[in-house]
């Protein structure tokens, strides 16, 4: 080992290394290391987002629907479950602090209903044999990296094989981006195999906005790819934390990033992100901002 390598190994990390990775955090680091630092290492508060909150609401409504006996999983019951979900989350900061006009709020709820209705154009939920919803799963790769995630729905098909289903409330990907969009559910295939001892026969994304179903079958190659990529991403994360080197990476995703104003690529100052976002969260929640100064 060279002197430079010894010094590098002994150097204190610039940021704490995450103890695990998830499909979303891996996707964020791959897309933009700076956004990963803000969101997953510093865990800076982000303002509520109408599209993300709408997705949460629809996921919850479909979760309630799948808790019902199969014969009760009708459109009428799904709309009732959507109303129940709206009532259950109304006081949560993700929804209570959405900055929407009355017209925008009405559109928000109307759009959520459209997504629930379109779900029924993809499949008949009465024919789904549900094993679990919102399942928390985790496993350790061959490289010692912990992967964790939440499966929207795990089920059995007509042949008794496992199927992983993920609901998507955003736009369906273009043809060239389909396989990239499957990366997260391939991770869930590995997690199922490790936790339950069975590999899913297929994984599917249900894009409710189109509506459209995208299906793929996991293979030895795809699961090996998950392990290789996860180990590589964690190694890159560790190096970035040690060196405090989280360089921004611009892409079309920048238009939807909560941290854009603090990004050097947009003439922002990263050091202002924490005080600014913490102060804004305190203002949204009606809390006094610290430190307080008394006369």
Image (cartoon, grey):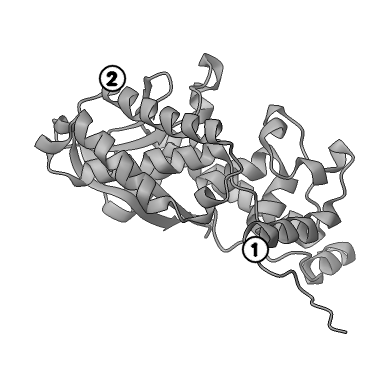
The residue tagged 1 is 286
Image coordinates of residue 238 in percent, x first then y, are: 69, 58
Image coordinates of residue 86 in percent, x first then y, are: 38, 45
Q: Is residue 55 left or right of residue 71?
A: right
Image coordinates of residue 194 in percent, x first then y, are: 35, 52
Question: Which disc, if any, is residue 269?
Answer: none
Q: Nearer the viewer, residue 209 or 8?
A: 209
Q: Is residue 237 above or below residue 178?
A: below
- Observer able to see residue 182: no
Q: Secondary structure at mark 2?
A: helix
Q: Residues within 10 Å of mark 1 (few under 14, many from 20)?
A: few
Q: Secondary structure at mark 1?
A: loop
The residue tagged 2 is 121
Place residue 152 in its image quadrant. Answer: top left
Q: Is residue 62 above or below residue 291?
A: above
Q: Nearer the viewer, residue 179 or 89?
A: 89
Q: Is residue 213 left or right of residue 180?
A: left
- Observer able to see residue 242: yes
The C terminus is located in which quarter? bottom right
Q: Is residue 114 left or right of residue 171?
A: left
């Amino acid at each position: 080992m060279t002197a430079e390598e010894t010094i590098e190994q002994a150097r204190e990390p610039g940021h704490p290394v995450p103890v695990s990775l998830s499909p979303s955090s891996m996707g964020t680091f791959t897309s933009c290391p700076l956004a990963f630092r803000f969101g997953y290492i510093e865990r800076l508060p982000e303002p509520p987002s109408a599209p993300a909150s709408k997705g949460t609401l629809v996921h919850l409504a479909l979760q309630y629907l799948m808790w019902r006996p199969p014969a009760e999983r009708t459109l009428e019951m799904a709309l009732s479950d959507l109303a129940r979900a709206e009532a259950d989350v109304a006081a949560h900061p993700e929804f209570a602090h959405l900055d929407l006009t009355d017209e925008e709020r009405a559109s928000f709820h109307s759009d959520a209903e459209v997504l629930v209705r379109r779900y029924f154009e993809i499949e008949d939920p009465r024919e789904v044999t549900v094993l679990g919803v919102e399942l928390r799963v985790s496993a350790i790769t061959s490289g010692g990296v912990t992967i964790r995630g939440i499966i929207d729905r795990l089920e059995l098909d007509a042949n008794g094989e496992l199927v992983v289903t993920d609901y998507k409330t955003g736009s369906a990907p273009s043809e060239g981006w389909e396989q990239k969009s499957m990366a997260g559910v391939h991770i869930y295939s590995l997690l199922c195999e490790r936790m339950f001892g069975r590999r899913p026969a297929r994984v599917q994304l249900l894009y409710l906005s189109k509506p459209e179903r995208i299906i793929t079958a996991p293979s030895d190659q795809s699961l090996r790819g998950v392990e290789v990529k996860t180990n590589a991403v964690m190694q890159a994360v560790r190096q970035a934390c040690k060196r405090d080197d989280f360089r921004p990476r611009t892409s079309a995703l920048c238009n939807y990033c909560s941290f854009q104003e603090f990004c050097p690529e947009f003439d922002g100052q990263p050091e202002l992100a924490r005080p600014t976002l913490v102060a804004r969260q305190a203002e949204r929640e009606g809390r006094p901002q610290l430190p307080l100064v008394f006369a």
